[in-house]
Image: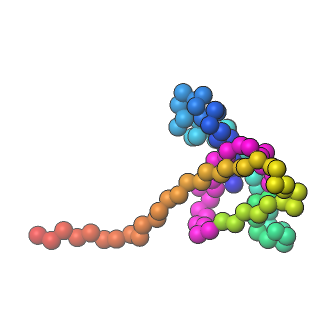
């Protein structure tokens, strides 16, 4: 999984947001963890009070859902974390025939 800092002030400071998003050097990488607890996951800390854009690149994964869990170290006084993820609605292939 890839993660990109996406705070409002940071985004506002970019003269070309598309260039910032497309530049892979701006992303951190979070490696997949195929352990038992938690099972088949990406486990990583977030700095609270910030926004992040996440994506799985061109891995071919086709998620229908994603679960997030909080650490037992989370406290009610911690700030929010906001995650942005792309949504792509995949359409079935269809044949179109034009009669004449």
Left or right: 37, with 96 as reference point: right
Residue shown at 50% from the left, 59% from the top = 88
> Predominant secondary structure in magenta?
loop
The stretch of residues the image draws in magenta is 44-65
Does 7 sit above or below residue 75? above
Please provide percent x and percent y for residue 59: 62, 59
Using the image as rendered, state which of residue 84 and residue 59 is in the foreground: 84
Is 50 magenta? The answer is yes
Please provide percent x and percent y for residue 40: 76, 68
**Among the 4 quarters of the image, the one containing residue 76:** bottom right
Residue lying at the far left of the rendered structure: 100
Residue shown at 75% from the left, 52% from the top = 30
Left or right: 54, with 16 as reference point: right
Image quarter in which the C terminus is found: bottom left
Does 71 sit above or below residue 29? below
Left or right: 36, with 59 as reference point: right
Residue shown at 64% from the left, 56% from the top = 56
Does 55 sit above or below residue 33? above
Is 76 magenta? The answer is no
Left or right: 23, with 81 as reference point: left
Please provide percent x and percent y for residue 92: 41, 70
Using the image as rendered, state which of residue 81 and residue 66 is in the foreground: 81
Please provide percent x and percent y for residue 94: 34, 71
> Can I make out residue 98 in this image?
yes
Residue shown at 67% from the left, 44% from the top = 51
């Amino acid at each position: 999984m890839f993660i990109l800092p996406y705070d409002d002030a940071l985004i506002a400071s970019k003269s070309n947001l598309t260039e910032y998003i497309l530049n892979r050097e701006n992303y951190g990488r979070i490696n997949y963890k195929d352990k038992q607890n938690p099972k088949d996951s990406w486990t990583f800390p977030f700095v609270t009070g910030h926004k992040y854009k996440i994506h799985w690149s061109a891995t071919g994964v086709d998620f229908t859902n994603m679960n997030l869990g909080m650490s037992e170290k989370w406290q009610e006084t911690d700030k929010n974390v906001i995650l942005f993820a792309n949504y792509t609605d995949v359409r079935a292939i269809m044949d179109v025939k034009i009669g004449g």
